[in-house]
């Protein structure tokens, strides 16, 4: 008998990034993940530093010439939309849109 793969093992990298973003947003605002919906997830290129998102509580990152490919993920919680950027195992919270 073959072992059953775990749900996380069968997810694509994009699906894992979306799930991580939903879990992070739920933690930030103390919401159940069921109240967070995906608006869109698209391929994009970002500056390498913090995936182009401003650091939390700080000034925007200085422009960096190196661009990296990843995904721009927009989630909705209530009436507000929030942007995340993901690349591989990296996830950056960009704030409300």
Image (spheres, grey):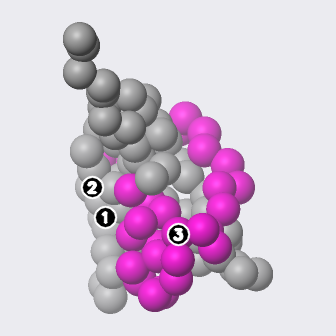
Instruction: Say above or below: 23 vs 15.
Output: below
Mark 3 lies on residue? 33
Q: Are marks 1 and 3 in contact (CB under 8 Å)?
A: no
Horizontal placement of 74 versus 27: left or right? right
Magenta extent: 20-48
Q: Nearer the viewer, mark 1 or mark 3?
A: 3
Q: Nearer the viewer, mark 1 or mark 2?
A: 2
Cα distance between the residues tagged 1 and 3: 33 Å
Closer to the N terminus: mark 1 or mark 3?
Answer: 3
Q: Which image quarter holds the C terminus? A: bottom right
Q: Is residue 32 visible?
A: yes
Number of other residues with Cα within 10 Å of mark 1, as a class: few under 14, some 14 to 19, many 20 or more: few
x and y percentages locating residue 75 in the rendered image: 61, 63
Mark 2 lies on residue? 49
Q: Nearer the viewer, residue 60 or 84?
A: 84
Residue drawn at the location 55% of the way across and 64% of the way down: 83
Report if residue 63 lies within the magenta region: no
Cα distance between the residues tagged 1 and 2: 8 Å
x and y percentages locating residue 16 in the rendered image: 40, 43
Q: Are marks 1 and 2 in contact (CB under 8 Å)?
A: yes
SS at badge 3: helix
SS at badge 1: loop
């Amino acid at each position: 008998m073959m072992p059953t793969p775990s749900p996380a093992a069968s997810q694509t990298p994009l699906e894992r990034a979306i799930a991580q973003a939903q879990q992070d947003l739920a933690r930030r605002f103390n919401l159940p993940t069921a109240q967070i919906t995906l608006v869109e997830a698209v391929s994009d290129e970002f500056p390498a530093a913090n995936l182009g998102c401003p650091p939390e509580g700080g000034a925007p990152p200085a422009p960096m010439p190196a661009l990296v490919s990843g995904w721009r993920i927009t989630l909705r919680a209530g009436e507000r939309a929030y942007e995340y950027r993901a690349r591989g195992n990296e996830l950056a919270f960009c704030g409300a849109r």
